[in-house]
Amino acid sequence: MGFHPLIPQNWNRMFTVWIEDVQVRFKPVAKVAMDGGMLRRIRAATRVSAAVVILFFSLHCTKPPVAAKKPAKTATENQDDFGQGYMELGVATWYGGNDGFEGKHTASGELMDSSKLSCAHRTLPLGSFVEVRNLDNGRQAILRVNDRGPFLKGRILDVSRQGAKALGFLEAGKANVKIRVVKQDGSPSDYGQAVDLTNPYTIQVAALADPENIARLTKDLEAAIGPVTAQSFTTTDGRVVQRLRVGAYTSMEEAQKAAELVSQRFGARGVEPFITRRY
C-alpha cells in the first residue's frame, strides 16, 4: 500500500512506526535512562507533533473554497439617478434612412429627419426630452420626442438613425435601454410630478395647420366624442400646427378603448389617433 500524504490515517501510522523505531534504537544505549524519563518525553513530543501535522492537513483538505468576491459597483451604478420622475425600462429600436420614413410627417407635424437626435414614444408629450441610457454599453444621449411609436410589442422607444449612432446600437438594430424625462439641458424634470395622476391619459386625434380643417374636425369630434382641447405647436420647419385632443382617462386600457372608437368613427378621414399623457 502506497503512502498518501493527504490521508490523516497514513500520517498517524507513519509516526507510530517511527516512534516504535525510536524506542528500539534507544533501548540498547541507555536502557534505564530512556525507560525512566527521556523516552517518555520523546514519545510525548512526537505524538504532539504528529497531532499538529494531522490537524494541519485535515483543516487544509477540508477547508471550503473561498467564494470569489463580486466587484464593487462603480459610482455611476450606485447613483439612483432614475429614482425620481418618469422612468421606463425596455427595448429600443431605430428608424429613418432607407425605410420610407425619411422626410415624412411625424406625429408632431414636423418632417422626419434621421440626422437629428429625435425619437418616437407611445405616450410621452410631443416635444419633451428624454435621457436614454443604453444598458448594453453604458452610452447615453438626450433625444426629443417628436413622433409616436414603436408599435411592436415589447419595445418602448424608436430612435432616429442619429440617435442609434449616438447610443451605439446602429449595427445591432436594438438595445436594452432605460429612459427618463429631462429638460433640454439634461437637468431633472418635474414631469412625473406635474402630470394629473388621476386621469393622466388623453387621445391626440390630429395635428393640423389649416384653420378650416381644424374647425371642421373640432366640431365633429365634440359632437361624437366630447370636449376638444387644442394645443399650438411650432414645428422645426416653422409651421404652426394645432394638436387636437379629446378625453381624459384613468388607465391605459380605458384610453385604448376610446382611441379605437375614435379610429372607427374618423379613420376614413385620414386621422390616426394615439394615446398621450396630459401635461
Image (cartoon, rainbow, N blue to C red):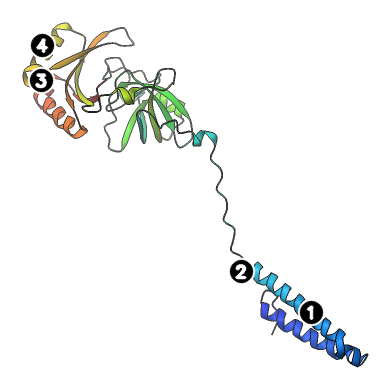
Q: Quadrant of the N terminus?
A: bottom right
The local secondary structure at tag 1 comes to helix
Q: Find residue 158 and report its horizontal and vertical position in percent.
A: 34, 28
The residue under label 1 is 46
Query: Disc 2 and disc 1: Cα gap in Å?
Result: 24 Å
Query: Disc 3 and disc 2: Cα gap in Å?
Result: 78 Å
Front label number (1 vs 3):
1
Q: Residue at x 21, y 9 (%)?
A: 209
Residue 125 visible, this orientation: yes
Earlier along the polypeptide chain: callout 3 or callout 4? 4
Q: Residue at x 12, y 14 (%)?
A: 218
Earlier along the polypeptide chain: callout 4 or callout 2? 2
Front label number (3 vs 4):
3
Q: Residue at x 34, y 11 (%)?
A: 236
Q: Find residue 71 and report its horizontal and vertical position in percent.
A: 56, 45
Classify residue 193 by image quadrant.
top left
Front label number (4 vs 2):
2
Q: Label 3 is placed on what type of residue?
A: Gly
Q: Nearer the viewer, residue 111 or 40?
A: 40
Query: Disc 3 and disc 4: Cα gap in Å?
Result: 14 Å
The residue under label 3 is 226
Q: Label 1 is placed on what type of residue?
A: Thr
Q: Is residue 19 above or below residue 134?
A: below
Q: Find residue 194 and report its horizontal and vertical position in percent.
A: 30, 22
Q: Is residue 275 above or below residue 66?
A: above
